[in-house]
Amino acid sequence: MVAATLSLAQAPTAPEATDASKIPDPEKVKTSAESVGRMRGALKDVLQKLEEARNTKDVVKLNCVNEKLTQIKGLLRISEQSDVQLQEAVARKETATAEHEFTKVTIARSKVEQLRAEAEQCIGQLAFRTDENLSVEVEVPDYLPPGDPSQMPPPISIDSRPPPASPTM
């Protein structure tokens, strides 16, 4: 998990969606194509994680990775369509449409990178399952006081009423 986090932290990030109007159209097309390529790479990585989960026969990991994979496939499909529409908008010199499609690809890339990291966590997580044959032994250190500190002693019961505070009563 640490290696995945480091590689994501070191990866060049796509320009933010708010900067789309400041990026020239040819750069948008180039960055969008690179982003789609990175998303395809993420898809391949998560497919490998899915295979790894299948090989371990861990249903919890398999379901977790499969959920991330499904989301990545959807985002990649949207990004591929947006990449084509971006290229068409640039060719027609439709700046607003180009910015919109570029923003969609940029947001999808960010989400796919997040899903890739989550898929890595799925494989790294322990499947919390127990069976009826599980036993746990607890060793209590000698220096601890005896008894259960979570059990409070019962309150002291008062058998008689105290004397009146005032002699006139």
Image (tube, rainbow, N blue to C red):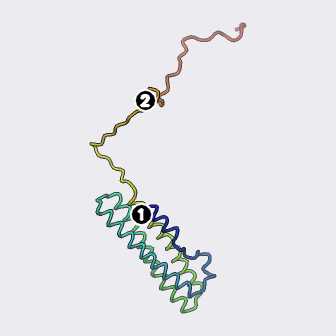
- Left or right, residue 57 beside residue 75: left
- Left or right, residue 109 beside residue 19: left
- Quadrant into which the C terminus falls: top right
Q: Is residue 157 above or below residue 60?
A: above
Residue at image position (45%, 65%) is: 4
Disc 2 marks a residue whose amino acid type is Asp
Q: Looking at the picture, how far across and down is residue 113, in whole percent?
A: 48, 69
Q: Is residue 67 above or below residue 169?
A: below
Residue at image position (55%, 77%) is: 103
Question: Of tags 1 and 2, which is closer to the observer?
Answer: 2
Foreground: 6 or 44? 6
Q: Is residue 134 above or below residue 158?
A: below
Q: How many marks?
A: 2
Label 1, on which residue?
120
Instruction: Label 2: state its secondary structure.
Output: loop
- Quadrant into which the N terminus falls: bottom left
Q: Residues within 10 Å of mark 2 (few under 14, many from 20)?
A: few
Q: Are marks 1 and 2 in contact (CB under 8 Å)?
A: no
Label 2, on which residue?
142
Q: Looking at the picture, how far across and down is residue 158, in whole percent?
A: 55, 15
Q: Looking at the picture, how far across and down is residue 166, in whole percent?
A: 71, 10
Residue at image position (32%, 47%) is: 130
Displayed quadrant of residue 126: bottom left
Disc 1 marks a residue whose amino acid type is Glu
Among all residues in the image, which is located at the extreme left?
Answer: 133
Give the CA separation, mark 1 to mark 2: 42 Å
Q: Looking at the picture, how far across and down is residue 107, in whole percent?
A: 53, 73
- Left or right, residue 52 beside residue 22: left
